């Protein structure tokens, strides 16, 4: 089975996994979760854009969603983005970068919204101890 077919199958499975009703309801769920910062949903939305399943085949939009997911630690999305970027024109790359920046500014992330592929939350700062708040080594 070719890599492209495997990715299409993943996209189809995403619709089945994320949606409980019709395919449109599944797509709406994926889109909502992606817009909320869920890296896995962002990857699946990118796949659906790249291969045109239920969405117009649009590589620029796919790069946007792959980039957003990659920023949240999704390695598969980073790979897909890196494979797709050479197919875009300079203008399309600029359009994608502008949309990524706009979406990053609008999205609010929390560990539960970002999904399993997101970066872990930073560890809390250690409490000072000892005289003058000096930390022991």
Image (tube, rainbow, N blue to C red):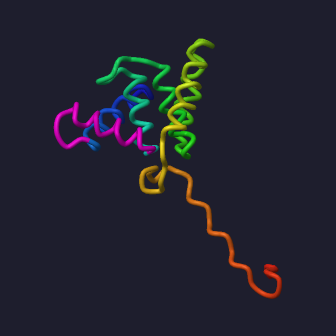
Q: How many marks?
A: 0
Using residue 8 as the reference point, say whether residue 129 is left or right of it: right
| Image spot of residue 20 (x, y percent) | 19, 43
Name which quarter of the figure residue 32 lies in. Answer: top left
**Residue at left 48%, top 46%?**
108
Instruction: Name the spot of residue 96 as percent of width and height, x first.
Output: 55, 23
Q: Quadrant of the N terminus?
A: top left
Q: Residue at x 46, y 50 (%)?
A: 114
Q: Quick one: 95 or 45, which is closer to the camera?
A: 95
Q: Residue at x 43, y 18 (%)?
A: 58
Residue range in magenta is 19-37
Q: Residue 23: within the magenta?
A: yes
Give the residue furthest to the front: 132
Compare residues 69 and 105 and report the one nearer the observer. Answer: 105
Q: Quadrant for residue 126, please give it.
A: bottom right
Q: Is residue 123 magenta?
A: no
The image shows residue 87, relative to residue 124, as above or below, that is above
Magenta span main SS? helix
Dividing the picture into quarters, in which one does residue 40 lie? top left
- Residue 46 drawn at (x, y percent): 43, 30
The residue furthest left is 21
What residue is rendered at 40% in x and 39% in y?
34
């Amino acid at each position: 089975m070719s890599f492209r077919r495997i990715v299409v199958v993943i996209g189809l499975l995403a619709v089945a996994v994320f949606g409980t009703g019709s395919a449109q309801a599944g797509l709406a769920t994926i889109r909502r979760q992606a817009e909320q910062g869920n890296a896995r949903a962002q990857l699946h939305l990118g796949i659906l854009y790249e291969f045109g399943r239920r969405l117009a085949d649009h590589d620029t939009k796919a790069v946007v969603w792959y980039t957003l997911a990659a920023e949240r630690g999704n390695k598969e999305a980073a790979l897909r983005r890196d494979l797709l970027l050479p197919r875009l024109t300079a203008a399309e790359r600029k359009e994608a970068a502008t949309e990524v920046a706009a979406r990053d500014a609008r999205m609010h992330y929390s560990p539960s919204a970002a999904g399993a592929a997101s970066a872990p939350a930073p560890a809390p700062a250690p409490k000072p101890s000892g005289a003058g708040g000096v930390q022991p080594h």
